[in-house]
Structures are given as C-alpha cells and as structure tokens.
Image (cartoon, rainbow, N blue to C red):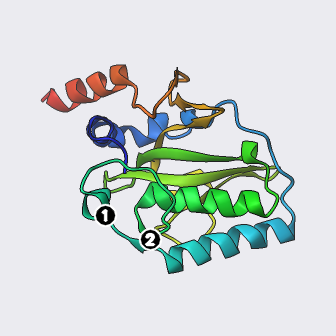
Amino acid sequence: MISTPWKAAAIMLAGLAGTYAGAAWAKPARHTALTAERMAQLQQVNSYVNSTIREVSDMEQYGREDVWALPTSGKGDCEDFALLKRKMLIERGWPPSSLSIAVGATSQGEAHAVLTVSTSQGQYVLDNLTSSILSPAQTGHVFHARQSGRGWISASGERTSEPVADLPVARYARTAHASP
C-alpha cells in the first residue's frame, strides 16, 4: 500500500470525493486508440493478474510497509497488482505513456492503488478489487495522485517525486469535521 503518512491523509480526504475525485486526471497522459482488440487485452490482463496473484500486505510479505515490487512470489498488494498489469500491457505493445498508477482511497476509506489507462475513449481503471474495466468515476474510489512522467501529480496539480495528498485539503477536512 501507500506509505503511512500518505494513508492518514488519504483517509482524511475520503469524505471529499465529490470535490476532488476528478482533479488528479488533469493533463492526461498520451491517449491510445481503443480498439476491440485493445479492450480485450485490458480485460485479459486484469482478469489474469487478479486471479493468479494472492493479495497479502507488505507487512505480511516483507515485514515492513510500502514495498512497491512486481509480485514475483505470486503474492502482493494493490500497487504490486498494478505494477504487474502495467508490465504485461507494455509487453503487449501498449505505450508506457498511456499507463499510470493512481493512488487514493476506496469508498471504505482504505488507501488503494490501481493501474489507469488513457485511451481515445477516455480513462479506464484496472483494479485488483474487480474484474470489470471501469472508468475512474465508476470505481467509487477517490483518486488523490497519479503518475505523471517520472513523478506524481496531486489532485491540486502539484508535482512531486512521491504520491502525496494535498495537505491544505487535509487541514480543511479536519476543520470541517471538527465543527458542530
């Protein structure tokens, strides 16, 4: 999963889904033409990885939090699933610039990472929580940051070297929840 400080901020921001869910998609990556064959590849890769990798936490597998690695042991957590899906799609000819990892929170407030695909028909999400290929809005997740080039872009457009939540928004969330 995402680093511990990021998890806390993501949980605080989960209540602001309607306000910030789409902002992390600003300045999309290169769009790839979406053909029936390409959609079939997305479905095949998503289903294959979801059915062959067993979900375990980084703490259980590595004895520490926040390890991003290909799940070569057959086990991994959400970002490991996303990394393997990205690798497999690149091997099938997908341009790396159309594939990025997005981080945020599930509708239950759990920190989560998914693979996003930028196509001529819009953005799609490959998620280890479902075999369906969905748009970001259909997932029910709140996205706080996504890969952009060699770094990350947050919901407010801030570019960073690691995925982070926007702290001014997190401070607002604490204040908003504290008022009677």
- The label on residue 50 is none
Q: CA distance from mark 2 to mark 1?
A: 9 Å
The residue lying at 29 percent from left, 23 percent from top is: 172
Q: Is residue 85 left or right of residue 93?
A: left
Quarter of the C terminus within the rendering: top left
Q: Is residue 168 above or below residue 164?
A: above
Can residue 95 be seen by looking at this rendering?
A: yes
Mark 1 or mark 2, which is nearer the start of the sequence?
A: 1
Q: Which residue is mark 1?
A: 61
Q: Secondary structure at mark 1?
A: helix
The answer to whether marks 2 and 1 mark residues whose Cβ atoms lie closer than 8 Å is: yes
Q: Is residue 171 left or right of residue 99?
A: left
The residue lying at 64 percent from left, 56 percent from top is: 86
Q: Which residue is mark 2?
A: 73
Most foreground residue, 50 or 28: 50
Asked which quadrant contains residue 138, the reply is bottom right
Q: Is residue 136 left or right of residue 64?
A: right
The residue lying at 75 percent from left, 70 percent from top is: 41
Label 2 neighbour load within 10 Å: few <14, some 14-19, many 20+: few
Amino acid under disc 1: Gln
Residue 21 in percent (x, y) is at 50, 40
Q: Is residue 171 above or below residue 24?
A: above
Asked which quadrant contains residue 92, the reply is bottom right
Amino acid under disc 2: Ser
The residue lying at 48 percent from left, 58 percent from top is: 80
Q: Secondary structure at mark 2?
A: loop
